[in-house]
Structure formats: C-alpha cells, structure tokens
Image (cartoon, rainbow, N blue to C red):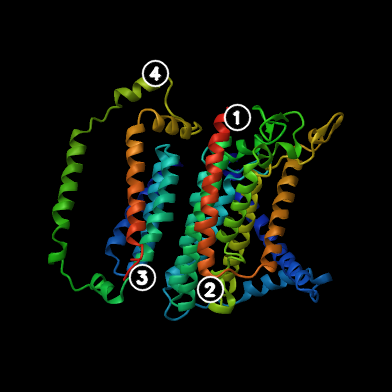
C-alpha cells in the first residue's frame, strides 16, 4: 500500500517540479534574452517582472480551447498529451542523488532513448491533426531533425556506456565519485578514488568524452528543437511550426514539454558526463571537501545546480547564434557529428581494452 | 494488481488492433498502430523481457512507424483514395488472400491449444529447483550481451551483415545519377 502511494506521489512531485521549473525558466529565458539584446526584458509585473510568467500561465489556463473546423479532432486533442507524457516519463529513470531515483532499472538509459522517440510521434500527430500547411511542414522538419539527431545522441551514449559497462543511470552516477567500489583513474593513469570531486567525472576519466559531451550537447539541443536548431517552429517562416493551431492549456502543455525536454537532456548529460550528483569539490589532504559535500541533500543540490547551469548555457546559445538552414542542419548532423561520434566510440573501445581493463 | 494490468494491456492491444484494421482513415490507423505496439511492449514486460519491450518501442515507434507515417504523408492523394475507398464488399477480389492466411493462423492456433499440456514444463521446474529462475530485479542485459557474443554470435553477425546490406542498398537507391 505504501509503495502504491509512493508510486503516485513521486510523479506528482516531479510534475510540480517541472511546472515550477518551466515558469522560472521562461522568466530566466526572457531576462537572458533581454541581457543579450541589451534591453531590460519583462519589468512590469511584480518586482523586476518576476510575476510575468505566472500571469502568462494564468492567462493561458483561462483561454478557450479552439479546435480548427477541418482538423482531425481526436489527433489534435491527444497530441499535446502524448508530447508531454513522453518527455515526462523520461524523468522516471534519472537519479537525483545516490539511490534517490524514481525507478532504479537496469535499462534506464535505453528507456530514455526509446521514450524520446515517442515525442517525435506526438509532434507528427500535432502537425497532421492541425490540418494546416505550416503545422505539417513544421512537424515534418521536426521529425527529420529529431530522427537524424538521434543518431549522434545514441552514439555518444554508447561511447559512455562502453566505459561504464552499465545502462543503469544510478550506477553510472555512482561510478563518478568517492562512493564508488571500482577504481577511478583521472585521464586513465592517476587513481583518484580518495580525492573524488571534479577529477572523478566521466569527462575527466577519459578525455575523449569531452568531445563526446560537446556532440551530445549539440545533438540534444537539436532534439529539443531549440535555436539554433529551431527550424521546426521558425517563427519567421512557419508562423509557429507544428503548434501553430494550438492555444490555451494545450499550448501550455507543448511549451511545458519543451522546457521539460531541455531539463531532461541537461540532467542526462550531467549524469552521464559531469558526475551526476557527485560534488565537484575534491578532497585535498585534511580538507575533506568531497566528503563534506556528499549526501542526499547535497546530491539533489549538485544535480539541480549542474543541470540548471547547462540549461542556462542552452538559453545563452539560443539568443546568441542564428538559425541554421535545413541543409546546413543535415550537413552538421551527418557529415560532422556522426563521424566524430563514431570516432569517439572507436576510441572508447580501445580505451576500454588498453587502459581500463 | 498485476493481472489487472496484464488484461488491460491485452485488451488495449487487441481492441486497438481490431479498430486499426477497420478504420478507413489511414492517418488515424497509423497512430492507432502506435497504441498496439505500445501495448505489446507492455505485455513483454510481464515476461520480464524489459530489454525487448524497450527495443520494441525504440525500433517500431521510433523507426518503422515514423517511416510509415512519412511514406503516407509523401504519397499521392489519388493513390490513397484507392485504399480509403469503402466500396469493397466483404469478399471483394483484393481481399481474398487474407482469408486463407487468417484461416491458416486460426488452424495453427487451434493446433497449438490442442497440443498444449497444461502442466509446467520440466525445464521451468528444473530452474525452480536450482533457484536459477529470472526475477524482475535481475540484470538481463548483461546476460543478453554475453549470449549474443558467445552462443548466438553467428546469427548476430549474419543479422548485422544483413542490416549493412540494407543500408548500402538504401544509399545506392537514393543516390543521384552523375551523368544525365
């Protein structure tokens, strides 16, 4: 009985977290945009405009649900739910702290990859259901982009899994800090089990993972359909892309899914490459900084801090770089990222055999 | 609780499959196909085949289904009219192949039920006695990987060569002719 209640409470808690995160992420995004473009951003509602997004969501919730007359009504209604649920389910297998994970499965990483592909289906459903040429074009672009960029993402995940030898995200995170049972070697030669901290992170255990992380970051940025990879919803060409026809709470859910996806991929990157919930502070002599900053609350704090930092970089990139053209997008994926990811995978295999084994 | 979930998934799979073949709207049928595949993946979980379940979603939903939707959306409207045409009666010509197929499957299933002895097979009993049965918390992936690279290495390699051939064929077909 207690288990069942827990199984209901945890998703609710995650949902509340995602909703609050989205509210403040949108505010942060506007403020960052304002900073980048040398203006103030929202200033009117609340102190420094801090209530602006809350006012926006209240407006969205009150709006009438409009379904276009010629739309496929069922698909149109279901699509935002599928898009959101697909992303939301991904949070089930990501650890927040040691053993503090909604579902501790051996197939965690693989599960996330599969779940993210459902998101693409939801977008296609939205585009087709709207019966609008802009929506359809936007969703076609989105699918082409997401299916292509799934390949570099998958390859970079394999690169990590080859070294960690497990798909369990909890164990991958444990393997990057002072709590591990195995041996951790900084750059493959210096044993850092005692020191921990930033030296024990995956990207510093094997240096080619830094390249892999950059590939992963770029590719997941495209998976989220965010600038500079936002041709699916390019406002200047396609009105609003696949969500042109959506309004009110349905639009809110699509928006929520986009921000949840941003946070999901940031968190995934943090767990796989940047040490997960492990502290960046090392033990130096009697200064046991890694021991002091390891624990349940510290773990949650580090996960949040690192993930929010990555989300911040995503926003910074969005407002700095111009949008890529469709052919440039595909060139980047197939001619740059995919071969590089294959190369990293090969290095990983050699690394595994020669250095770790 | 588990049997309720099992029957819910089974009902979902069968119900949406029945609806799928009766639907005239192809776009909706394809999206229903997603529900069928998803419910099937749920059923795999009850066989403790979590890896197979996730692979099902990954390959079929992420790959095959999206490809089918693409093919559907890029194909000619006139071409689709034939498919969406509801004029055909129950035994019209294009459907006659389906009847022997369906009958064959039915016979196969009846044969299976007739042959089925309702006792637990000996190999399951043996593994119960030796305590080697798989439980839900076991790490099956390691087992699958080891089996792939030892017992089933030949089929595994044959499949990968087959996939490679398909890839090369696809890239050859999509290549533009240089001199025209």
Identify the residue at horizontal 75%, vertical 73% (top origin).
A37
- The residue at which mark 4 appears reads as B129
Mark drawn on residue A241: 2
- Report in which chain the residue with disc 2 lies: A
- Report in which chain the residue with disc 3 lies: B
Residue B110's place in the image compared with A250, above or below, is above
Occupied quadrant, residue A3: top right
Q: Nearer the viewer, mark 2 or mark 1?
A: 1
Mark drawn on residue B16: none
Q: Between residues A23 and B153, which one lies in front from this camera angle?
A: B153
- Report in which chain the residue with disc 1 lies: A
Mark drawn on residue A356: 1
Is B5 situated left or right of A324 in this image?
left
Q: Quadrant of the N terminus of chain A?
A: top right
Which numbered disc flags the more N-terminal residue, 4 or 3? 3
- The residue at which mark 3 appears reads as B74
Is A173 situated left or right of A114 in this image?
right
Identify the residue at horizontal 55%, vertical 42% (top origin).
A159
Dot 2 and dot 1 residues touching (CB under 8 Å): no
Q: Are marks 3 and 1 on the same chain?
A: no
Q: Position of residue A227 (x, y in %)?
A: 62, 66
């Amino acid at each position: 009985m207690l288990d069942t209640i827990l199984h209901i409470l945890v998703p609710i808690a995650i949902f509340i977290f995602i909703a609050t995160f989205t509210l403040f992420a949108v505010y942060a995004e506007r403020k960052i945009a304002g900073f980048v473009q040398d203006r103030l951003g929202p200033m009117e509602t609340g102190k420094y405009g801090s209530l602006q997004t809350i006012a926006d969501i209240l407006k969205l919730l009150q709006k009438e649900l409009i379904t276009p007359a010629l739309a496929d009504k069922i698909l149109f209604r279901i699509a935002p739910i599928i898009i959101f649920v697909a992303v939301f389910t991904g949070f089930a297998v990501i650890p927040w702290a040691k053993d503090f994970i909604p579902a501790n499965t051996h197939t965690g990483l693989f599960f996330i990859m599969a779940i993210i592909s459902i998101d693409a289906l939801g977008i296609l459903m939205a585009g087709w259901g709207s019966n609008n040429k802009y929506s359809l074009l936007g969703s076609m672009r989105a699918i082409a982009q997401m299916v292509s960029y799934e390949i570099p993402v998958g390859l970079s995940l394999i690169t990590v899994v080859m070294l960690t030898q497990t798909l369990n995200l909890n164990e991958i995170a444990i393997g990057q800090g002072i709590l591990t049972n195995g041996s951790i070697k900084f750059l493959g030669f210096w044993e850092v089990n005692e020191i921990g901290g930033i030296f024990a992170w995956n990207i510093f255990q094997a240096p080619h993972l830094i390249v892999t992380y950059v590939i992963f970051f770029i590719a997941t940025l495209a998976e989220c359909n965010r600038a500079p990879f936002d041709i699916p919803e390019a406002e200047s060409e396609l009105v609003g892309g696949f969500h042109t026809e959506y309004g009110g709470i349905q639009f809110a859910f699509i928006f929520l899914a986009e921000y949840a996806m941003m946070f999901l991929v940031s968190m995934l990157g943090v767990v796989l490459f940047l040490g997960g919930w492990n502290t960046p502070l090392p033990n130096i002599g009697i200064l046991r900084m890694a021991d002091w900053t390891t624990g349940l609350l510290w773990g949650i704090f580090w996960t949040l801090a690192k993930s929010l930092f990555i989300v911040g970089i995503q926003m910074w990139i969005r407002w700095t770089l111009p949008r890529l053209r469709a052919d440039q997008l595909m060139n980047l994926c197939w001619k740059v990222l995919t071969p590089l990811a294959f190369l990293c995978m090969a290095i990983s295999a050699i690394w595994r055999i020669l250095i770790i084994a | 609780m588990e049997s309720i979930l099992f029957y819910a998934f089974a009902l979902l799979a069968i119900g949406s499959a029945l609806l799928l073949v009766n639907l005239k709207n192809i776009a909706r049928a394809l999206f229903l196909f997603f529900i069928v595949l998803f419910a099937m993946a749920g059923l795999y979980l009850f066989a403790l085949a979590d890896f197979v379940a996730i692979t099902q979603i990954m390959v079929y939903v992420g790959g095959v289904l999206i490809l089918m939707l693409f093919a559907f959306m890029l194909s000619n409207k006139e071409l689709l009219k034939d498919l969406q045409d509801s004029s055909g009666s129950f035994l019209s010509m294009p459907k006659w192949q389906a009847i022997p197929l369906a009958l064959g499957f039915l016979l196969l299933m009846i044969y299976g039920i007739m042959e089925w002895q309702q006792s637990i097979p000996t190999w399951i009993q043996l593994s119960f006695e030796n305590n080697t049965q798989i439980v839900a918390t076991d790490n099956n992936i390691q087992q699958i990987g080891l089996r792939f690279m030892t017992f089933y290495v030949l089929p595994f390699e044959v499949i990968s060569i087959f996939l490679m051939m398909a890839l090369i064929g696809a890239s050859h077909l999509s290549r533009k002719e240089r001199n025209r």
